[in-house]
Amino acid sequence: MIDDANAPINKTEGDVTIASFAELHNITLAMTGTAKRQLDIISRSLEPVVYDTKDFLDSVKNMILTHRGKVRIVVIDPATLISRNDHRLVEMAMRLSSFMEIRKPGEHHAEFNEAMLIADRKMVIYQKHSDRYESVANFNAPRMAASLSDNFDIIWQHTVTIPDFRRLML
């Protein structure tokens, strides 16, 4: 467990327990900074303290521009983002729509309440309850990542686009 926002993150040893939003942000940053091919994210409302920071956005943008990575995001409660209308990750997704997509769960998964970030089908952050920051991370968990990726793919297949997150380009 990380005690403060500047503590080093161990990327090689098993599971890391996350007990605060600062830890969640730091580990998310470390993971996205390492990712090269793909990020799959399920989040309640793309919590700004984690997903709307300059460091996180720079990390995602670097993955996309340097490695031509792909980002798929499922937002469980998009109404919060729509009402805010200023989330920088949503803006980035609208600008880089060839590489990033944000959708909401279909009716089969409307009550889904977990959160996760899967990077390159190897690294994982998993929250049993999407409305809490307590979670487990692992930088080298290909089996866990494969299982969560399979679940993510099933949810993704039944997602619905969010019209408010589309930009009409003329």
Image (cartoon, rainbow, N blue to C red):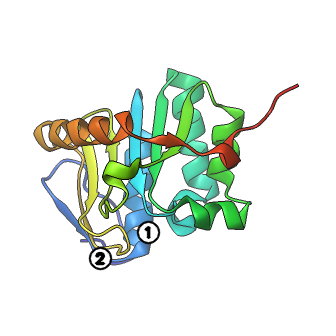
Split into 4 quadrants, where in the image is the C terminus?
A: top right
Image point (26%, 67%), residue name: 135
Q: Secondary structure at mark 2?
A: loop
Q: Quadrant of residue 40?
A: top left
Q: Which residue is painted at 37% across and 69% down in the image?
A: 23
Tell me which corner region of the image, top left, top right, bottom left or bottom right, holds residue 81: bottom right
Please name the residue that numbered disc 2 is placed on. Answer: 19
Question: Percent x, y for residue 153?
Answer: 30, 35
Tell me the distance, in whole angstroms, between the alpha carbons under discs 2 and 1.
15 Å
Asked whether 123 or 80 is in front, the reply is: 80
Q: Position of residue 86 (x, y in %)?
A: 73, 60
Left or right: residue 166 versus residue 46 is right
Q: How many marks overall?
A: 2
Q: Amino acid at mark 1?
A: Asn
- Which residue is the extreme one toward the front? 107
Q: Amino acid at mark 2?
A: Ala
| In the depicted structure, whether residue 72 falls above or below residue 2 | above
Task: Say whether residue 30 is visible.
Answer: yes
Specify which label sits upstream in the sequence, 2 or 1.
1
Classify 125 as above or below 1.
above
The residue tagged 1 is 6
Quarter containing the N terminus: bottom left
Report the front residue among 127 and 108.
Answer: 108
The one nearer the camera, 7 or 120, is: 120
Q: Position of residue 80 (x, y in %)?
A: 60, 67
Q: Say if mark 2 contacts mark 1, CB within 8 Å.
A: no
